[in-house]
Amino acid sequence: DPKIIQKPKYLVAVTGSEKILICEQYLGHNAMYWYRQSAKKPLEFMFSYSYQKLMDNQTASSRFQPQSSKKNHLDLQITALKPDDSATYFCASSQERGIYFGPGTRLLVL
Amino acid sequence: AQSVTQPDARVTVSEGASLQLRCKYSYFGTPYLFWYVQYPRQGLQLLLKYYPGDPVVQGVNGFEAEFSKSNSSFHLRKASVHWSDWAVYFCAVSMGNYAQGLTFGLGTRVSVFP
């Protein structure tokens, strides 16, 4: 059974629209993260949450807003989408120092 | 700020041959180091992790890595590669503060041929 669920798997959006990426983890971890993987760039750390509180934000744009309604949920809202936002977005979680990743949501902005 | 360099973008290896993937890190302090693997169209899977201690770390599927503070390296090795090892391998470093996430290298794409 998958321990970190991300929905949807694929997402196509138009420029200027808003989308929410869903993440749920069933590992019992207290810390959750969002990472972004774009072509020809390193996997990029975006946010970290611990016990539903924002710990670190390395995303320059306020168009990216994480939302945590439950301890094991960390959704990512992206507003005013741009073609440069096209990437695969990975949710992750950790309890100790090993970080475990979900399968990703592949976003394409046209 | 910490950084990770994986100098080999692509590596081609024959099935059954040995494999070494290089990773150099830049970090002022004691790093925590990781290797992840990404199979085609999948997420990242943790292969192994290094915490300060024994410099040789054993991971899953026959992988191991060796930490060298003098060389600022954390190279990944496997004695005998299988076709299923065809994937992209990422090295990552952490400051040990889990809140600050991981810094990744660009990855090394490994192709395995019979």
Image (cartoon, helix red, strand yellow):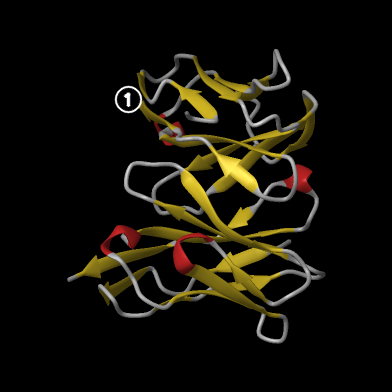
* Residue under label 1: A110
The image shows residue A100 at horizontal and vertical percentages of 59, 42
Front residue of A14/B48: it is: B48
The image shows residue B77 at horizontal and vertical percentages of 48, 75
Report if residue B54 is visible in the image: yes
Relative side of A14 to A3, left or right: left
Tally of marks: 1
Relative side of B114 to A70, left or right: left
The image shows residue B104 at horizontal and vertical percentages of 57, 57
Give above or below for B30 relative to A91: below
Quarter in which the C terminus of chain A is drawn: top left
Residue at image x 49%, y 14%?
A: A18
Give above or below for A28 relative to A35: above
Front residue of B54/A107: it is: B54
- Dot 1 lies on which element? loop
Residue at image x 54%, y 18%?
A: A79
- Give, as a three-letter code, the residue at label 1: Leu
